[in-house]
Amino acid sequence: MTDTEGWTVRLSAARPLFERAGAAELVADVLRENVIDGSLPPGTRLSEETIGNLLGVSRNTLREAFRLLTHENLLVHELHRGVFVRRLAAADVADIYAMRRVLETAGVRAAATAPPEAVREVGRQVDEGRAAAEAGDWVAVGTANMRFHRAIAALLSSPRVDESMARLLAELRLAFHVMGELRPFHEPYLEGNARIAALLAEGDPERAERELLAYFDAAQAQLLAAYAEHTG
Amino acid sequence: MTDTEGWTVRLSAARPLFERAGAAELVADVLRENVIDGSLPPGTRLSEETIGNLLGVSRNTLREAFRLLTHENLLVHELHRGVFVRRLAAADVADIYAMRRVLETAGVRAAATAPPEAVREVGRQVDEGRAAAEAGDWVAVGTANMRFHRAIAALLSSPRVDESMARLLAELRLAFHVMGELRPFHEPYLEGNARIAALLAEGDPERAERELLAYFDAAQAQLLAAYAEHTG
DNA sequence: ATTGTTGAATTGTTGAACAATACTCCCGCT
DNA sequence: AGCGGGAGTATTGTTCAACAATTCAACAAT
């Protein structure tokens, strides 16, 4: 036994692999994927019969999956009318950004006491984004951007914050579908993200926070503008 | 029509009365109550057959209720084993306080731009707590304390923050059951809460934040101490 | 004492049935 | 033509019963 202390934690880390998911969870995963990537646009009605036949599950399990996604704010449930892919109002977009401001600014302020690996992860996502941009893959730039901001919140090392952040970003993707072109929405922020990562790496959280807040204002304004145009 | 602007909000406030809650929601309400007040202690297994017969609902609706509460982090669901009242680990308690620090300090910093009514609500809960303390009702002091902290987070005027905060505090109640006596846990903080409210009212968020952080450290330490004693 | 094995109990999932509600289309009326 | 009203249809809400899959405890074997 060369390893006199670490094997228990390594085993318990592997534990999630054993708690398999039930059918409802699997169905929810599939639907979540299709909602997030836009295959099921906001407003789409999800018929129990149709989806049930499509995925080969019974109505009961399907309803459990619906309930899961409803509580993730990706679907809305109207009594006796069915479930629909959520349509975010402008106020929702603003609220999501409000909460992101809270969580992410707290993240950058915690950078000093965060594990170095967590700080490196922020920079890593900047590189991912740049690589995707050079390849012209703006969808990949978008996901790299999401991961960048998740990494910022993760500086707090709080599972609950991580989960909230993941849910907020998943919700936000519902709003992205109103943006026709992704490039003008993602490209301008590649540089800003790089600046934030650099400021964090060199230990200047105050300026990183200012930079981050500027990003929020710009991105929110841009998104809401597209929103007003799209709905009006 | 003497009322040219307020009737729409009053109507929409009455709206919840019309969208009937399904059976699952009602069952969830009952169970939530019993979990929160300790009738169903952490670790209790909730048998589908037993509870189903007890409440007179079918297994399907019961399972939907279970899922609701699982998503609120009050129950845990283990595949093929059933649902159990959540047992909070010490790490969970610490994490809950970590996220509270994030949300509530953000609330305090937003006090200047928050609606005056929201600031008054903070002070109101201080008074509630004091009144309950004089009456010797330490359970009521506890709920007033919860509402006090919810009011602080509510200074951000963000529905999503409010919901997160409500869930965190509901979770935290699971931990309170290890405290035998409530008085020594709640009484010391009445004065601190009053100071925080006063500092907010007179526009000194920096000191309010310091006071609040001191509260978090003290309460978390006290709770974790009781935890260590109880489990060890 | 540890390791298989068996069997009972519980959960997971399905399909069907019926009730309650919303939606559609057609009819009669103005 | 346009506008209600109403019957019929389609969909969801809820329950129930059955079977499959899995866990758990008791027991047997080594």
Image (spheres, coloured by chain):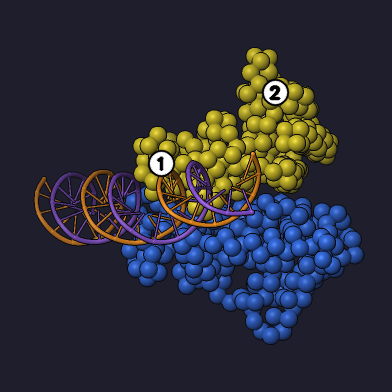
Chain colours: A yellow, B blue, C purple, D orange
- Residue B144 visible: yes
| Residue depicted at x 43% and y 38% | A51
**Picture coordinates of residue A162 (x, y %)?**
61, 43
> Which numbered mark, 2 or 1, is in the foreground of this view?
1
| Mark 2 Cα-neighbour bin, 10 Å: few <14, some 14–19, many ≥20 | few
Rendered position, B30 above or below B112: below
Q: Which image quadrant is residue A131 in? A: top right
Name the amino acid, label 1.
Glu
Most extreme residue toward the right is: B202
| Circles 2 and 1 on the same chain | yes
In the depicted view, which residue is nearer to us: A213 or A62?
A62
**Picture coordinates of residue A38 (x, y %)?**
58, 31
| Residue depicted at x 60% and y 49% | A160
In the depicted view, which residue is nearer to us: B80 or A83?
A83
**Picture coordinates of residue B42 (x, y %)?**
47, 64
Image quadrant in which the C terminus of chain A is located: top right
Image quadrant in which the N terminus of chain A is located: top left
Mark 2 → mark 1, Cα distance in angstroms: 34 Å
Chain identifier of the residue bearing label 2 in the image:
A
Q: In the rendered image, which residue does mark 2 sit on?
A: A181
Q: Point out the tag, 2 or 1, that comes first from the N-terminus.
A: 1
Q: In the rendered image, which residue does mark 1 sit on?
A: A49
Rendered position, A52 above or below B45: above
Q: Which image quadrant is residue B130 in? A: bottom right
